[in-house]
Image (cartoon, rainbow, N blue to C red):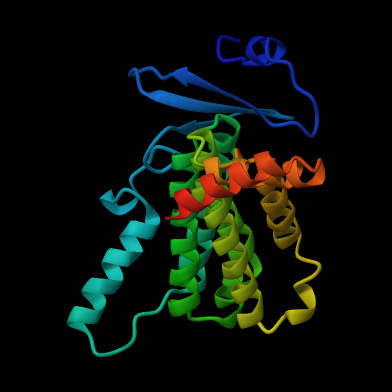
Amino acid sequence: MSDDIGRILGAWDYEAGELRVRTIDGQEGERQIQIRIDLGIMQLTWSGRPDGTRPHECKSLLDHYQRTRVKWERENEEDFTLSHQDCWALGQEAMQYYWRRISFFELKEYERAEEDAVHNLGILDLCESYAEHDEDRSISDQYRVFVTAHRIQARALRLLAEEDHGEALTVIRDGIAEVEQIIEGHGELEYMEESPELKFLNQWEKEVEESRPLSPREKLNVDLRAAVEQERFELAASLRDRIRKMEE
């Protein structure tokens, strides 16, 4: 059959458990993302909603419900709410953005990965604030730490790619505090030590700190300690003078 994709699948090596991602030029010249999965290929748009649709003539379902909420609150006295079906549809959209987000990580498109993480945090905020049913509001508790950690990781990786180690460390450290605050806000202090996201961020902070290039002042301090240990006191005195001048 002319529509059989077996030839395409056969030409694309696949290992179970590995994420295989590539970009292609679509029929209209627009960039597309393809993800090889066990049963075939998933194709996502590079920008806009990943499935290429415009629900209710909006760029995304999140955008549609945000607009609907503003209009509702302007025209009605009753509180705006999201039905179970509304939250389910938003959850399906979040899954699309999740697949594209991890694809952007694989492609080292960290700024776009962060944008997709922010989109999904917007979905969690909307459901948490306006869902009609408790079970839909609780979705935020389940996924907020995970998506927040992805947002932090994307921003820090972009900074590391730009060799801005200092700012990347700031993002990671602020991110650790933010994740701890989320867990504390959920009343799950016992989960603090078990959280895989916190473990990853804490370990990553140490690795970035150890691998970052030293500033000129830090290099002088390292040389000073070495000179003192080697009892090269004249050199140590000279280094102290240089450090003092740098401080001044």
22 in relation to 61, above or below: above
Measured as percent of width and height from the top left, residue 161 is found at 52, 34
Residue at point 56%, 26% (across, down) = 34
Residue at point 46%, 49% (across, down) = 245
Residue at point 81%, 40% (across, down) = 230
Q: Is residue 165 visible?
A: no
Measured as percent of width and height from the top left, residue 61 is found at 38, 56
169 in relation to 137, above or below: above
Residue at point 24%, 80% (across, down) = 73
In the image, 8 versus 20, the foreground residue is 20
Q: How many marks?
A: 0
In the image, 214 versus 94, the foreground residue is 214
In the image, 45 versus 2, the foreground residue is 45
Q: Which residue occupies the extreme front position in the image?
A: 234
94 in relation to 23, above or below: below
Measured as percent of width and height from the top left, residue 132 is found at 48, 81
Place residue 105 in its image quadrant: top right
Q: In the image, is 172 to the left or to the right of 83?
A: right
